[in-house]
Amino acid sequence: AITRHYKFDVMLQNVTRLCHTKSIVTVNGKFPGPRIVAREGDRLLIKVVNHVQNNISIHWHGIRQLRSGWADGPAYITQCPIQTGQSYVYNYTIVGQRGTLWWHAHISWLRSTLYGPLIILPKLGTTYPFAKPHKEVPIIFGEWFNADPEAIINQAMQTGGGPNVSDAYTINGFPGPLYNCSAKDTFKLKVKPGKTYLLRMINAALNDELFFSIANHTLTVVDVDAIYVKPFDTETLLIAPGQTTNVLLKTKPHHPNASFFMSARPYVTGQGTFDNSTVAGILEYEESNKTIKSSHSPKKLPFYKPNLPPLNDTSFATNFTSKLRSLASAEFPANVPQKVDRQFFFSVSLGTNPCSKNKTCQGPNGTMFAASVNNVSFVMPTKALLQAHHFGQSKGVYSPNFPINPLIPFNYTGTPPNNTMVSNGTKLVVLPFNTSVELIMQDTSILGAESHPLHLHGFNFFVVGEGFGNFDPKKDPANFNLVDPVERNTVGVPSGGWVAIRFLADNPGVWFMHCHLEVHTSWGLKMAWVVLDGKLPNQKLLPPPADLPKC
Ligand code: C2O
């Protein structure tokens, strides 16, 4: 294992897409941002220098950050933001993970332009549990806004309404030929016949789950969220914001004399009208030297487009997620907690806050949109929670009384209750070191059932169960998979249903959990866990670094 150094200069850069040129916040002037490549076991030292007017923080999405919570990155949770002219070195070691993760800004909506791949190769001397691919290619989905995304969310939060949707989805920063004024901004993947490619797919879009498919090609899923899974073939995959999926693409044995669209568009449930346009890239076969010599003029090749499932195809989504299983091999075991110390039931839903006096609000019935977990809409603190916890200064910053059940149980997927109001607070759950946690997350029908990709910082969890309707504590646990459930850091709570996860709280610190649909995070669909230090020296949070930003 070695130490790898990176420098992230956060700076403005002019970028043109869809015929709109604007100045965006980037890392090193790149959009999407630079790729980090390391091996399992390596230490990363990433110096982030803020040259822009915005406050910045960077999160290393999916990195476990064992005892190194100071480097996790969510603003006001584990650190104060890096202010203009300041810098901070994120310092962490990659333990027990290999695959694809990513990094993104974790403050306001800056992650719309500040994001990039974080690739973890197997330890030196070890290899993949599948044949070594000919080539590896990151495929990162995003969203392009012609307007300033910060202004969009600030305005939505002021008026209480829903924010404007983006103008395009992107693949590696490019919207592709199906949008106006975009044909030249198309991601092209050149391949050779008869080879296997490892596509490292990342959904960095702000607000949409995506279906993805390559015309006339089958994909083999081998890894999600940097954990190997039992390989399976699929034409189309589903990937929620925050999630990563590695797939193998076997190219045709001979040059097919055609090109193929690779495209993505949203999976959307619940109410609301969303942008339903499609981002496309192109899979292009390289001519062999022989064909190039024999053909005098390059011919126009036919194009094939994939068939993506309909926008609201929940049965496709359910079928796809049910195929995801941990590899659970001798080398890569699934350490599913078999016993549970503490059980939690969280309802995750949209709701409303009253409109303040003398204002007109654009949320449902003149209210302001809000979102909550167990009816609590999370209020961002003005000091970082991890410092407050570590230095024993939690008073006035947060309270340790997050409700372990919904305050008023109701029929979550039946007739919506009349009262959609949330309560507001900065409430946390406190867990002793090594607590084995089972958490049921239940979607509700308040303001429409909608699928929520819930992301937990600092841990991977096992998805032991999933179902539709109300979770039934008497019947459903009997069907939990405690053998080879998928292990990941972001899981879709199904629209009108529930998901059950288990994790071992073996990482001391303060860990954010939130919906990875950015608008829901803004509305308060978030909370945090405090995991206390254990007794042994190697069970304690490391001391804070000297350059930790101050609020
Ligand atoms: Cu990818 Cu808290 O975020």
Image: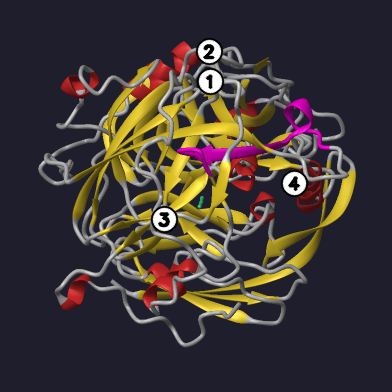
- Give the colour scheme of this rendering: secondary structure
According to the image, label 1 marks what residue? 445
Q: In x, y percent, where is residue 473?
A: 24, 23
Q: Residue at x 35, y 60 (%)?
A: 530
Q: In x, y percent, where is residue 178?
A: 76, 25
Q: Residue at x 71, y 39 (%)?
A: 354
Relative side of 216 to 3, left or right: right
Please state the extent of the stretch shown in magenta in the rendering. 361-376
Looking at marks 3 and 1 on the same chain, the residue that comes earlier in the sequence is marked by 3
92 versus 483 height, above or below: below
According to the image, label 2 marks what residue? 415
Marks 1/2 in contact by CB < 8 Å: the verdict is yes
Q: Nearer the viewer, residue 17 or 456?
A: 456
- Tell me how far mark 3 sits from mark 2, CA to CA: 30 Å
Q: Residue at x 35, y 29 (%)?
A: 499
- Tell me how far mark 4 sits from mark 3, CA to CA: 23 Å
**Residue 86 tag number:** none
According to the image, label 3 marks what residue? 428
What type is the residue that disc 4 sits on? Met
Q: In x, y percent, where is residue 129?
A: 23, 41
- Is the residue marked 3 within 8 Å of ligand 1, measured from its CB? no
How would you rate the neighbour count of disc 1 (Cα within 10 Å): few for under 14, some for 14-19, many for 20 or more? many
